[in-house]
Amino acid sequence: MAGDVDYMLRVVIPDMQSYFVFYKKLIHAVPLKNVTSRFAMEKIKSITALPVPPIAVD
């Protein structure tokens, strides 16, 4: 990553109330300058691995 992002967390929670609890615990536990959140409204793809074909060795 480059730019103004130092860390990225992927947090899976059941609802927004649970996110709020997580967020409050996070900002009280770690001195953070800025927190930005993005939310997925639905699951489009659940697999992140890319298929890599085998390499033939002669």
Image: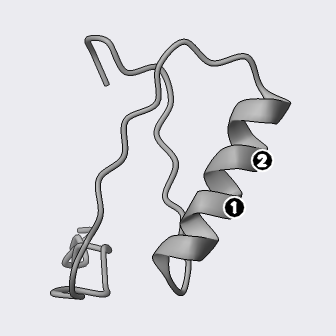
Q: Is residue 17 left or right of residue 26?
A: left
Q: Is residue 22 above or below residue 44?
A: above
Q: Is residue 31 above or below residue 54?
A: above
Q: Marks 2 and 1: in contact by CB < 8 Å?
A: yes
Question: How many C-alpha atoms fall within 10 Å of the one at disc 1: few (<14), some, or many (≥20)?
Answer: few
Question: How many C-alpha atoms fall within 10 Å of the one at disc 2: few (<14), some, or many (≥20)?
Answer: few
Q: Is residue 23 above or below residue 10?
A: above
Residue type (three-letter) at the residue carrying disc 2: Lys
Foreground: 35 or 1? Answer: 35
Q: Residue sitting at 49 percent across and 58 percent down?
A: 10
Separation of marks 1 and 2 at Cα, in angstroms: 6 Å
**Residue 25 place in picture, x, y as percent:** 77, 47
Q: Which residue position is annotated with label 2?
A: 25
Q: Residue sitting at 23 percent across and 70 percent down?
A: 55
Q: Which residue position is annotated with label 1?
A: 21
Secondary-structure class at tag 1:
helix
Q: Residue sitting at 68 percent across and 58 percent down?
A: 22
**Residue 50 place in picture, x, y as percent:** 23, 73
Residue type (three-letter) at the residue carrying disc 1: Val
Q: Quadrant of the C terminus?
A: bottom left
